[in-house]
Image: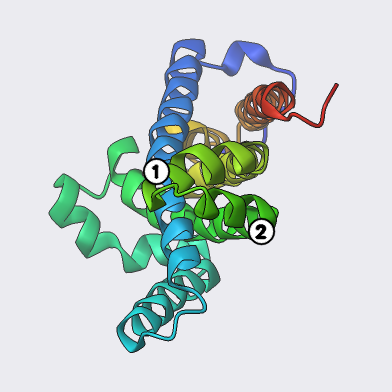
Amino acid sequence: MGGNTGYFEFSTVDWNQMWSATWETIWMTVVSIVAVAVLGYFIGLLLLETSGSHNLIVRIINWIVALFVNVFRSIPFIILIVLLLPFTKQVVGTIIGPVAALPSLIVSAAPFYGRMVELAFHEIDRGVLEASDAMGASQWQIITKVLLPESLPALISGITVTTISLIGYTAMAGAIGAGGLGNLAYQEGFESSNNTVTLVATVIIVLIVFAFQFIGDFATRKVDKRVL
């Protein structure tokens, strides 16, 4: 390892490499969050629909899903990456690069968001659901016409929080070769004692976080009927 460079020696930064790493981070985040949004929604819906049932089979399903959610929410992400390496190898054929990070990112975030979805559903006024049921609405109509619209602000807010967490996870995944800004900051910054690369990568990650937070807050305000 050579001597450390200063934080503002921008001539030492390979900007093409930096923009490529930025795109990889954004790509990993967007692909992961789409999958997490879909899986998390169904996990939350399944937890809601199977809760409080007197049917033994339904109660067992609820227990299994809740166990899955609680277990994978409890595992530190860096350990989960290592734990899922054989699975990742089987699914995507490699354990290196942005694509290899996707299984760990999705498995870590989907249970977290699923629990947020369940909480959002539970916050809906029960009177609205009972009224819909009394009017003869089918279960599908209740889900699509009542549950989803009424909980949409909370769902968007939840996916925004989850996205911010995922951006941090992509940086951690980069430390073991998943690509993106985390990988660049570790290999070209830390291991090469180039503080400028580390600083620039950090600033870009912060800007990405701000961008997703702004988009999420804007979307939440747009769909929230309580906001004038």
Residue 61: where, in percent of width, then height?
34, 77
Picture quadrant of residue 65 = bottom left
Question: For mark 2, what is the residue?
Answer: 126
Q: Amino acid at mark 1?
A: Val
Left or right of 134 in this view: 173? left
Question: For mark 1, what is the residue?
Answer: 38
Residue at x 41% of width, y 35% of height: 34
Residue 52: where, in percent of width, then height?
52, 79
Q: Amino acid at mark 2?
A: Arg
Q: Foreground mark, 2 or 1?
A: 2
Residue 86: where, in percent of width, then height?
21, 63
Residue at x 50% of width, y 57% of height: 114
Q: In this orientation, does residue 200 appear? A: no
The image quadrant where one finds the N terminus is top right
Q: In this orientation, does residue 201 appear? A: yes
* Circle 1 SS class: helix
- Along the viewing direction, whichever of 70 and 199 lies nearer the viewer: 70
Q: Is 56 placed above or below 152 here?
A: below
